[in-house]
Image (cartoon, grey):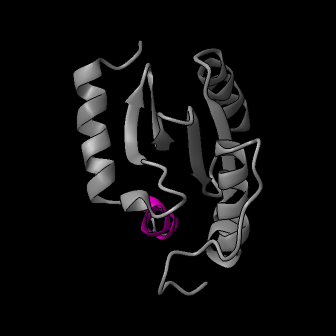
Amino acid sequence: MPASPGTLRTIARRMRREPTFNERVLWKLLRNRRLDDLKFRRQVPIGPYIVDFVCFGARLIVEADGPLHDLEADAVRDKWLKRQRFVVLRFPNSQVSQEPEAVLAEILAAANPSSGPSGHLLPRGEKAS
C-alpha cells in the first residue's frame, strides 16, 4: 500500500534533518542556485516517491545512491519518474565524494543539454574533497 502524501512529507522532513554524508556534500554544491543558477530542492515527495534532489525548472532529479540500493525497485521508480517527464541521474556515493566536479558536469549537461559546461564547476571558494 503506498504511503499517503502526509506520510511522505513527514518522512521527507526527517530525511532533510538527517542527510547522509554524500547528500550533505551534494547539497552544499547545489543549494542556493550555486550551479548555473539552477534551483534545486532536496528530499522532495513526487508522486509515491521521495527524491534526493530535484530541479523542477530543468525537470531533473539527482540521486546519491548508497551501497544498499535495490536495483529492481530503482528501475521501477526511475521508469515512473521518466513517465512524469523527469530526467533521473544516479551517482554512487563514491563518485559524489571523490569526483564532485565530474558529478556537477554531468548534472549541468543534463540540465542544459544544448550548452556544455563552462569553466570551473565548484562554487566560488569550494574545494574538491
Q: Residue at x 49, y 70 (%)?
A: 25
Q: Position of residue 12 (x, y in %)?
A: 31, 41
Q: Quadrant of the N terminus?
A: top left
Highlighted range, magenta: 22-30
**80 to 100, vertically: above or below:** above
Magenta-drawn stretch contains 32:
no
Q: Position of residue 4 (x, y in %)?
A: 29, 17
Nearer the observer, 29 or 34:
34
Q: Position of residue 77 (x, y in %)?
A: 61, 26
Name the magenta segment's main secondary structure: helix
Q: Residue at x 59, y 23 (%)?
A: 81
Image side of residue 72 versus residue 30, left or right: right
Give the tally of numbered discs. Answer: 0
Image side of residue 11 versus residue 20, left or right: left
Nearer the observer, 69 or 34:
34
Image side of residue 3 versus residue 122, left or right: left
Q: Residue at x 73, y 50 (%)?
A: 109
Q: Position of residue 47 (x, y in %)?
A: 43, 19
**67 to 12, vertically: above or below:** below
Using the rendered view, name the quadrant where residue 100 is placed.
bottom right
**18 to 72, vertically: above or below:** below
